[in-house]
Image (tube, rainbow, N blue to C red):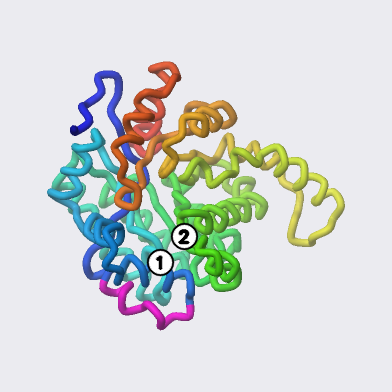
Amino acid sequence: MPIASNPDYQRIATEEAWAPPHMIQSYQKLVGTIGDPGFDSLWGFYGTSSSVRAKKVFSGLQDLGEQRLHDMDECGIDMALLSLTSPGVQCFDAATATALARATNDELADACRRHPTRFAAMASFGPLEPANAAMEIERAVTLLGMKGAIFNSHTHGEYMSDPKFWDIFAVCEQLQVPLYLHPQTPPPAMIKPFLDAGLDGAVFGFGVETGLHMLRIITSGVFDRFPGLQMCIGHMGEALPYWMYRLDYMHGVTVRSKRYACLQPLRQPISHYLRKNIYVTSSGFGLESAIRFAQQELGVDRVMYAMDYPYEYEADEVRALDGMDIPVADKRKFFQTNAERVFSL
């Protein structure tokens, strides 16, 4: 049975994946050619497998019309915030990534114009050309009406904690739009133990690698340099809310001991930045206790709903979250009004 509309709030899903057919075809051609075992594992499966799961994901990713809207209606999703699936354009060389980001942003913006009450979108960009990336984010936001920008963690093993990428943070702060850090598989330098156990993907490797990336951003001083910058991370914060006490303690004693030249004092504890500069979404976490914990520790204004379609598409999760034992006002923030405020919907 389809899930009915809720009279108390709309359901806005804030981490919903898409990829045009030409991008999927490019991913398929790259498998086995770029020396990235994580990419090969991810797209070697979704791009070639005949399994039921792979076929459903493969089909759902490419649709921006009838199928996606039908699936949203079946689960009672009023609006989806769309973005280019992992690894986005970041598996390509710098010039190709920049060109593809512009083209896919145009395609996604066109879909949002066709379905303005059902779709909104975040912009892609090629991080290896930071100045061009900043210009593309500005174009996508100011001319195409996109609601923020998204990147899929590391780019060829490089992390945005490196100051050479900081033009990207600067433009998002200037435009007052959120920057979403989305997972991908760990880079070649760290993936082997995950692959050996079949844990490189969303089951665990994604979260470990993405949580590491966010910590690198925080500890490099990005939020001291750009205090107005707001970022989002999915999957209930990639476990970081549950580590806040230990992160504060161990970061503090390590800095004071001067153990690492690269680890310098911050103006605030790590938990401060998680509470003031980070929003988390529930993508893939249909667990009331985890959501309540994040609301308690980060604040009810910093936790938003996401489904993670088409990788996760479970109507029972929506029903369970509708039934959470939290005040209706907080549930409305979780499902609707936080997303409306953060993404200017």
| Contact check, label 1 and label 2, Cβ < 8 Å | yes
Q: Position of residue 33 (x, y in %)?
A: 41, 83
Could you tell me which residue is drawn at 25 percent across and 61 percent down?
55
> Which residue has dot 1 on it?
42
Tag 1 secondary structure: helix
Q: Position of residue 231 (x, y in %)?
A: 49, 45
Tag 2 secondary structure: loop
Extent of the magenta region: 25-35
In the image, is residue 140 part of the stretch drawn in magenta?
no
Q: Nearer the viewer, residue 104 or 285?
A: 285
Residue 105: image quadrant is: bottom left
Label 1: few (<14), some or many (≥20) within 10 Å? Answer: some
**Mark closest to the chain's N terminus, 1 or 2:** 1
Q: How many marks?
A: 2
| Residue 103 relative to residue 269: left or right | left
As shown in the figure, which amino acid type bears the numbered disc 1?
Leu
Could you tell me which residue is drawn at 36 percent across and 39 percent down?
343
> Which residue has dot 2 on it?
201
As shown in the figure, which amino acid type bears the numbered disc 2?
Gly
Q: Nearer the viewer, residue 85 or 89?
A: 85
In the image, is residue 29 part of the stretch drawn in magenta?
yes
Could you tell me which residue is drawn at 48 percent across and 63 percent down?
185
| Residue 236 relative to residue 336: left or right | right
Q: Position of residue 31 (x, y in %)?
A: 37, 77
